[in-house]
Image (cartoon, grey):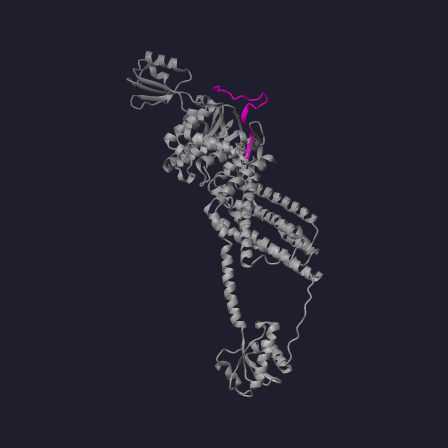
Amino acid sequence: MTSHAQVNTPANAPLNAIEAHHIVKRFDGETAVDGIDLTIKKGSIFGILGPNGAGKTTTLRMLLGIIDPDEGERFLLGSPDPITKAHQVGYLPEERGLYQSMKAYDAIAFMGALRGLPLAEGRKRGRQMMEDHGLGDAANKQIRQLSKGMAQTVQLLGTIVHEPDLIILDEPFSGLDALNQGKLERLIRGQADKGVTVIFSTHVIAHAERLCEEIAIVANGKIPFTGKVSTARDRLRPQVHLETRNLDGPWRSAIPDDCEPLGHNWHFTLPESGVEPLLRALVEGDAGIQSLSIERPGLHDAFVHIAGEAVAKKMEEDNALEGEVA
Amino acid sequence: MIETIRASFVIARRDFTAIIFSKSFFFFLLGPLFPLIIAIAAGGLGQQVRQDIDRPVIGIALEESQAVKLAAARKALTKSLGNGGIPELLVLEGTDPSDPDIREKLDTASKPLTAIISGSLEAPLLTGSKGDVKRWSGRVALLSETALSGSNPVVVKTDFVAATGSSKKRTQIATAQGGQIILILLTMILAGMVLSNLVEEKTNKIIEILAAAIPMDAIFLGKLFAMLGMALVGITVWSALGFIGASVILSGMPSLPAPAVGWPLFCVLMVLYFSMAYLLLGSLFLGIGAMATTVREVQTLSMPVTMGQLLVFFLAAFTVTKLGEPVEWFAVVFPFSSPFAMIARAAQMENIWQHGVALIWQAMFTLVIIRFSVMLFRRNVMKSGNSGRKKSLLARIRG
């Protein structure tokens, strides 16, 4: 994992922001979360990936202490009773909500006050943060007078106004336009640079790929993979895209037998032997290389490989549906 | 514990200011004015109608000398019985006292007549409908006797004492009933509002932010105390206006029978027992309302809840005159009727320590209800996806 500037923590402070040991949650006899084990180190940006209904939100709610697991145990910043650490945590739920009649800066202050920040200080910070995010003019407006994007920004600012050590964001990019998604990515990076642990769930893999050092893939209430993004990608061999002048020759022995050309184009998984023997065979065997690229698999490919085709398809459908709604 | 109190204060402050500084709060304050106006208007109309009905005119078909005596007797009797106690008399000029068709005069006289006296003072005949005759025959007999005796009515001298044991008991029962009625009316009007209190958080999807930041008990406590604060503001305003109104219109406060614990303590206990009744019922309603996901569900719940309140009130009202009996003890111990039963005790019993015990008992039960409501809420409402929403309200309460 990439090292980050660590916040000054006491010697006996826990090393992990989150620890979950075999947590299970059932609703009406149906298992929503089925024995998840998860460890998230402090100071990282951690992504939880999975399609809607995979169990991401239920997992986050259990980690935050909103609901209790039926089995297993979890520790948030070292505490088995997460609500006692609420002052150090910022949480943006998937279902956004604010009191409609509150003024924007007051809504930020209220969210800070919930987590122990004095109201006067929260109001001061709220105004300043809105100013910093180019929303100074909207500070005195009621939430109902703001656009959806502005209201979401206000809620996000309310999530971090008390300067938490751990930020948990449930589908933070959902409903945001491309511009605001970019702003949110910068904000997440900014918080991480200060040493804050940021955990977010998403079903848009590109965000996780850009932001996270580590991820957990959630599918059907389980976590089939947790670890570094690079490790996930390494689960798949690189893909070779080759264009040749010739269609046959001794060089064909270097290409997998089941690979059929599409015109003069060849797509295949890089053989176990690696790049060098392949290149040598192509050159010495007179393949007539027109173009050659060796691509490392993306997180999406790794996700499909790890979570399975069905889960990946559902996630793509979720993405498409959200695109239509937006 | 300190964190729960701090967090509940944050919630209470938000809710309280949101309510107090809303436009709708002004209409809330005006609320009791409407039934008051209706009551005054209906009372005035009713009184007018009653006066019209109760001002009977009795026709006199007697010899002239006897008619004069009867009129003099009426004048004398009205001094002691008042104008309303004796019917108005109308001499039917030129009518034969022994006319067999005297009943026809009932419809042909210059004023609508209730009945007609004919015959003689010694043997008066009262003609009229059965109801009117039964109602007025006693007064007619009194008039006739007074007219025949020709004497003035006896004047009764009076000697007032401060209070007798029995009169004190009677008046304290009246105070107990009055106190109960005020308590139940205020609780019924105000506690029901708590039912819809968490709907805003759920429809605005704020509940998850709150639940992740502070203990659920603090959310319930904060909301309850905010609503109690609002209720007390309303009661203060209404009491002040009522006091001013009574002072101006009635030229001073009406003299009310003093309760056993004295007025100052009784007023304090009224506030305390109202608060406890409000918190007890409010915590229950908040718990039930928290299970509801829509305003429509809340409205559906209002009916059985109001019926429940009435049952509690009937229980407490029934026991006012049964101090110390098992049924009264039940009303005292049963948490929801306890505040009403105890205010009745405050009116009739001088014992003060029992109120301390009752208040602690009621407060403890409020906390138990809140804890139970929170448990239900956490178990059944905070679910992701649709599983929580699809279940019926009853199923959610059952778990």
Residue A44 image offset from top left, x and y in percent: 49, 23
Vertical placement of residue A116 versus A241, above or below: below
What main secondary structure does the magenta stretch of the protein show?
A: loop
Name the quadrant containing residue B247: bottom right
- In magenta, the rendered stretch is A1-24
Name the quadrant containing residue A35: top right
- The answer to which of A209 and A179 lies nearer the viewer is A179
**Residue located at (57% from left, 41% from top):** B221
Residue A208 image offset from top left, x and y in percent: 43, 27
Tell me if residue B193 can be seen: yes
Residue A106 image offset from top left, x and y in percent: 47, 36
- The answer to which of A245 and A45 lies nearer the viewer is A45
Quarter of the image where the N terminus of chain B is located = top right
- The answer to which of B70 and A290 lies nearer the viewer is B70
Would you say residue A18 sits in the magenta stretch? yes
> Which residue of the protein is positioned furthest toward the left in this rendering?
A245
Quarter of the image where the C terminus of chain B is located = top right
- The answer to which of A213 and A90 lies nearer the viewer is A90
Residue B195 image offset from top left, x and y in percent: 53, 48
Is residue B175 shown left or right of residue B24? right
Tell me if residue A205 can be seen: no
Is residue A124 shown left or right of residue B361? left
Vertical placement of residue B225 versus A264, above or below: below
